[in-house]
Amino acid sequence: MFLHLGGDKIVPKKDIIAILDYKKGNSAVTKEFIQIAMDEGFVENISDPDKEKSYVITTEKIYISPISCNTLKKRFGESPGAEN
């Protein structure tokens, strides 16, 4: 199954490692991890400026999504009859 992250971006659920809130208190380690990923070109912002709501960490990239963390987590769990 797939998860729509916003815009035109859809990723396989099996590739998602974590979904984090963009503005809430991420630890210093998380902030450092995301900064290093940005510096190395592994972050793709699919959100409009000032509309960022969540980070979606996948096996390939980190996406900055305009969809809230809670909404993405709910969507992730919604797959009647499908394997998550």
Image: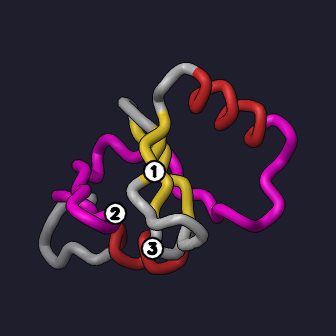
Q: Residues within 10 Å of mark 2 (few under 14, many from 20)?
A: many
Image height of 17 relative to 77, above or below:
above
Q: Residues within 10 Å of mark 3 (few under 14, many from 20)?
A: many
Distance from the alpha carbon under mark 1 to that under mark 2: 11 Å
Label 1: which residue?
45
Tell which tag, 1 or 3, sits nearer the viewer: 1
Nearest to N terminus: mark 3 or mark 2: 2
Please indicate whether residue 67 sits to the left or right of residue 54 in the image.
left
Image coordinates for residue 24, horizontal then vertical, percent: 77, 67
Magenta-highlighted residues: 1-29
- Determine the residue positioned at 72% across, 66% down: 23
Q: For this rendering, which residue is in front, 47 or 18?
A: 47
Label 2: which residue?
5
Nearest to N terminus: mark 1 or mark 3: 1
Residue 73, numbered label: none
Image coordinates for residue 42, horizontal then vertical, percent: 47, 29
Please indicate whether residue 16 sits to the left or right of residue 18 in the image.
left
The amino acid type found where label 2 is placed reads Leu
Q: How many marks?
A: 3
Q: Secondary structure at mark 2?
A: strand
Q: Secondary structure at mark 1?
A: strand
* For the residues bearing labels 1 and 2, Cβ distance under 8 angstroms: no
Image coordinates for residue 45, horizontal then vertical, percent: 45, 50
Label 3: which residue?
67
- Determine the residue positioned at 41% across, 40% down: 58
- Determine the residue positioned at 39% across, 46% down: 16
Image height of 30 relative to 70, above or below:
above
Distance from the alpha carbon under mark 3 to that under mark 2: 7 Å
Magenta highlight on residue 8: yes
- Determine the residue positioned at 74% across, 40% down: 30
* For the residues bearing labels 3 and 2, Cβ distance under 8 angstroms: yes
